[in-house]
Amino acid sequence: MTRGKLITIEGIEGAGKSTALQFIQDYLVKAGVEVVLTREPGGTDVSEAIRKLLLHSTASEGIAPETELLLMFASRAQHISQCIEPTLSAGKWVVSDRYVDASYAYQGGGRGIAMDKISLLDKMIVDGLYPDLTFLLDVPADLGIARAEKRGTQKDRIEQEKTDFFVRVRNVYLERAKADPERIRLIDATLGLGLVQDQVRRILDEFIRKK
Ligand code: T5A
């Protein structure tokens, strides 16, 4: 059986990932691909429990940056072993709303944890299971924040960070895209929905042709 492909979507808050995820699923289903949609942190019962702690903890002591990093990778270890790996092995494709690039961007860029520490966990947990394709939906921090606020939902623990946190997160994402342009495809997500989807569609057309 041919192994499935792993596609991930990244970007700061409000970049339009959830919207793009739906579009990608519809595109792949039309192309006859069996797809499983998932997300990080989360994607399995245990990983979703860790997500709750990460995003909605109300403990007065707060969550230290290193604890946050380890919880992100704990959630990812479970997600890989219980969802991503078995799905790919069964020949289905996985589309994940965020994956390991987010740890470099948020815990590295946002929280300032040294990249070599993140890289150690990456080697131990991800162990080379890198996405075949990553969409980086790029918007400036203030636009992403404004879009996320327009939704009117309550902000989670990380969404409550200040603009300069998201500026740093975005910068790391852009650096990673520059370092690996074959895998990480930059999408100008400041444009209207139709134009964002046109960019995504073009990349998927090319990806499906080559597969
Ligand atoms: N995290 C995650 C880490 O810190 N480290 C890690 O390793 C991992 C895996 C997860 C949080 O965890 C952090 C990052 C995150 O803080 P999440 O579930 O990914 O959280 O949720 P958010 O990033 O908070 O995602 P959002 O839902 O805020 O953003 P989306 O999904 O990018 O945005 P979306 O699609 O909901 O769109 C936002 C609004 O903008 C509109 C939409 O209609 C919506 O109202 N919109 C557009 N408007 C105009 N033009 C466009 N092109 C638009 N596209 C969307």
Image: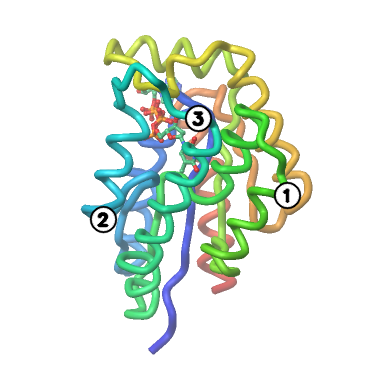
Instruction: Say what amino acid the circle numbered 1 marks.
Output: Asp
Task: Kindly state the secondary structure of the residue where label 2 is placed.
Answer: loop
Horizontally, residue 162 falls left or right of residue 185, namely left
| Tally of numbered discs | 3
Q: Among all residues in the image, which is located at the extreme right?
A: 179
Residue 16 location (% of width, % of height): 44, 30
Q: Among all residues in the image, which is located at the extreme left?
A: 45
Callout in the foreground (3, 1): 3
Tell me the quadrant of ligand 1.
top left
Residue 8 location (% of width, % of height): 48, 52
Q: Which residue was labeled with disc 1?
A: 116
Residue 76 badge: none
Callout in the foreground (2, 3): 3
Residue 173 location (% of width, % of height): 65, 37
Q: Nearer the viewer, residue 168 or 116?
A: 116
Upstream in sequence: badge 2 or badge 3: 2
Question: Image point 55% across, 11% down: which residue?
Answer: 162
Q: Nearer the viewer, residue 63 or 132?
A: 63
Task: Please report contact status of discs 2 and 1: CB closer than 8 Å, yes or no.
Answer: no
Instruction: Say what amino acid the circle numbered 2 marks.
Output: Thr
Task: Kindly state the secondary structure of the residue where label 3 is placed.
Answer: loop
Q: Which residue was labeled with disc 3?
A: 64
Q: Quadrant of the image for the N terminus?
A: bottom left
Q: Which residue was labeled with disc 2?
A: 44
Q: How dense is the environment of label 3, judged by Cα within 10 Å: few (below 14), some, or many (20 and up)?
A: few
Instruction: Say what amino acid the circle numbered 3 marks.
Output: Ala
Question: Image point 27% across, 15% down: which residue?
Answer: 153
Q: Is 82 drawn above or below residue 7 in the view shown?
A: below
Q: How dense is the environment of label 1, judged by Cα within 10 Å: few (below 14), some, or many (20 and up)?
A: few
Q: Quadrant of residue 120?
A: bottom right
Upstream in sequence: badge 2 or badge 1: 2
Task: Give the Cα separation between the discs numbered 3 and 1.
Answer: 18 Å
